[in-house]
Amino acid sequence: MRGREDNIVQPSHVNNTNSARFRVVLNHEDQYSIWPVEKPIPTGWQVSSNALSEGTREECLAHISERWTDMSPRSLRRNQANGST
């Protein structure tokens, strides 16, 4: 019997080799992601000024873990700070 892992399909842009290079990108809601350096950054995302400019997958994910301590979108945090829900 096949396990669930057998059914997982990696997107074609994901390269899991140790030599693959990624960028840390950030959207307008202060949400982080990683993106392969050889691909154009998607609309709505940008390389953050405080983000790791380029690294391995593991380096980029470690960088995100250090900085992305509140996964709430910026708009939700702003509304909560203003007393709105």
Image: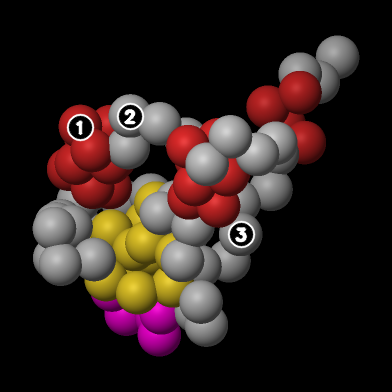
Q: Disc 3 and disc 1: Cα gap in Å?
A: 26 Å
Magenta highlight range: 37-41
Q: Disc 2 and disc 3: Cα gap in Å?
A: 26 Å
The image position of residue 39, as x and y in percent, is 39, 80
**Measuring 76% from the left and 23% from the top, which residue is drawn there?**
4
Q: Disc 3 or 1, which lies upstream in sequence?
A: 3
Residue type at mark 1 is Glu
Q: Judge whether 50 appears above or below 41 on screen.
A: above
The image position of residue 56, as x and y in percent, is 19, 51
Work out which residue is located at the far top of the displayed protein and give it.
1
> Was residue 40 drawn as part of the magenta stretch in this picture?
yes
Residue type at mark 2 is Thr
Q: Residues within 10 Å of mark 1 (few under 14, many from 20)?
A: few
Q: Is residue 19 left or right of residue 40?
A: left
Given residues 66 and 61, the one toward you in this image is 66
Residue placed under numbered mark 2 in the picture: 69
Q: Residues within 10 Å of mark 3 (few under 14, many from 20)?
A: few
Image label count: 3
Q: Disc 2 or 3, which lies upstream in sequence?
A: 3
The image position of residue 29, as x and y in percent, is 49, 57
Q: Judge whether 18 appears above or below 29 on screen.
A: above
Residue placed under numbered mark 1 in the picture: 66
Element assignment for label 1: helix
Residue placed under numbered mark 3 in the picture: 11
